Image (cartoon, rainbow, N blue to C red):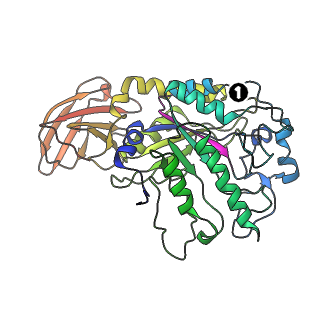
């Protein structure tokens, strides 16, 4: 039987249409207030350089945070409600990060949320999956193949760790209903220390419609790219480059450049959030915006409020984002464009003078309106399209101009 390596265009369509998702990094690390896993000061494993920053919490302290982990206010339905209020269409939760702690009731380690030593005593992943399904929210599981807690990881007994890793993936793929996204993180070591084809075959057979990101393989692969590159790319902490050929999703942190909860961390402004979403959509990608819930299980109120601001904007202007594709105009200093069929949306983020000048397109523009209110002029000259909106009609963040073209052209 032919192995299905990549998701179909049909399977990718809902995800491309969704445009906006919530990433959630959570676990006992929230108690320490440092970045999840990266603040843990433990031994280096061969081929896996865990110290991207100076770790501040000794492993013997970090690894016992779970004995204090008692998120009495954790309510998965409330998390989903926050994501829906933000206009997000899918959610991805860290089931296990590099620190090895599991937010699900696994059979293969006691370093988990349902351990007798952990006050939580709840299968966080099950409650999360149930809440997403109940609300019609698409469900994603992040799983780190790295595991700095497991004694066999990247040691001479690494084969035992592989068996553990594959067994846990089976649990996640079999015990929690339909899973829409499997989101891996970078793998330590080299490609020949892993068996990505087995993971791929297993995931595709158990969850036929699943989407898998580009981090299943190790980055070191005998000097060449692996055969399987995943269904979508994942530029991290930056906006991806414009591409209509290869699906992509930027993952960004809402607070302070760290993934898990950081008290009083600097939060993205509304303008920054909106521009990130627009630049992703205009580049024909998605935005996966991360929040790190508090140790008690709540999404920090100020973060929830910021996300609602984005959702309020999408309530008014979501038609220019959801279900759209990037282009036909390349992103520039002026802003970005999205389109649906014969409708083009210009998201003008910066005006340089009285108008913006765009390259020509192979279609006649039959009408134009300012979605955000006001009047617009559209003129064609030799080799250009000139779009002007009076200063009084310009939105302080994003002036949206809709151009309707003749026929039913699609510029994707």
**Residue at (48% x, 46% y) in the render:** 210
Q: Is residue 314 above or below residue 382?
A: above
In the rendered image, residue 157, in percent from the top left (x then y), is placed at 76, 68
Please give the range of residues in magenta.
Answer: 86-97
Q: Is residue 332 visible?
A: no
In the rendered image, residue 272, in percent from the top left (x then y), is placed at 50, 38
**Residue at (35% x, 48% y) in the render:** 9
Q: Quadrant of the N terminus?
A: bottom left
In the rendered image, residue 134, in percent from the top left (x then y), is placed at 54, 25
Label 1: how many Cα within 10 Å (few below 14, some 14–19, many 20+): many
Q: Residue furthest bottom?
A: 222
Residue that mark 1 sits on: 74
Q: Tell how many labels.
A: 1
**Residue at (35% x, 44% y) in the render:** 10
Residue nearest the observer in this picture, 340 or 162: 162
Residue nearest the observer in this picture, 246 or 177: 177
In the rendered image, residue 264, in percent from the top left (x then y), is placed at 71, 35
Question: Is residue 338 found inside the magenta-colored segment of the image?
Answer: no
Classify residue 235 as left or right of residue 46.
Answer: left
**Element under label 1?**
loop
Q: Is residue 250 visible?
A: yes
Classify residue 220 as left or right of residue 75.
Answer: left
Residue nearest the observer in this picture, 313 or 295: 295
Classify residue 398 as left or right of residue 113.
Answer: left
């Amino acid at each position: 039987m032919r192995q299905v390596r990549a998701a179909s265009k049909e399977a990718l369509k809902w995800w491309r249409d969704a445009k906006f998702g919530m990433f959630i990094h959570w676990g006992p690390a929230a108690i320490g207030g440092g970045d999840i896993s990266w603040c843990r000061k433990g031994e280096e494993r061969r081929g896996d350089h865990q110290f991207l920053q100076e770790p501040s919490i000794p492993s013997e302290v970090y690894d016992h945070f779970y004995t204090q982990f008692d998120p009495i206010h954790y309510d998965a339905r409330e998390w989903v409600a926050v994501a829906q209020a933000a206009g997000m269409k899918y959610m991805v939760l860290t089931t296990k990060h590099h620190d090895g702690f599991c937010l699900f009731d696994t059979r293969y380690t006691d370093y988990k949320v349902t351990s007798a030593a952990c006050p939580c005593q709840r299968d966080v992943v099950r409650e999360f999956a149930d809440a997403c399904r109940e609300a019609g929210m698409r469900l994603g599981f992040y799983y780190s193949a790295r595991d700095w807690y497991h004694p066999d990881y990247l040691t001479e007994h690494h084969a035992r760790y592989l068996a553990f890793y594959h067994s846990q993936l089976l649990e996640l793929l079999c015990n929690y209903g339909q899973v829409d996204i499997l989101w891996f993180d970078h793998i330590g070591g080299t490609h020949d220390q892993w068996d990505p084809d087995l993971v791929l075959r297993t995931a595709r057979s158990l969850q036929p419609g699943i989407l898998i990101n580009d981090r299943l393989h190790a980055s070191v692969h005998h000097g060449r790219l692996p055969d399987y590159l995943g269904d979508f790319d994942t530029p991290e902490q930056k906006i991806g480059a414009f591409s209509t050929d290869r699906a992509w999703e930027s993952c960004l942190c809402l607070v302070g450049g760290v993934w898990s909860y950081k008290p009083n961390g600097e939060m993205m402004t509304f303008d920054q959030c909106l521009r990130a979403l627009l630049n992703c959509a205009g580049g024909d990608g998605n935005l996966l915006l991360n929040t790190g819930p508090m140790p008690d299980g709540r999404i920090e109120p100020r973060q929830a409020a910021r996300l609602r601001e984005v959702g309020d904007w999408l309530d008014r202007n979501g038609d220019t984002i959801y279900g759209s594709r990037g282009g036909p105009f390349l992103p520039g200093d002026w802003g970005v464009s999205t389109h649906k069929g014969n409708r083009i949306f210009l998201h003008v983020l910066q005006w340089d003078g009285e108008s913006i000048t765009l390259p020509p397109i192979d279609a006649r523009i039959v009408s134009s309106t300012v979605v955000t209110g006001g009047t617009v002029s559209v003129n064609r000259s030799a080799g250009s399209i000139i779009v002007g909106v009076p200063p009084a009609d310009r939105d302080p963040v994003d002036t949206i101009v809709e151009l309707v073209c003749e026929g039913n052209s699609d510029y994707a």
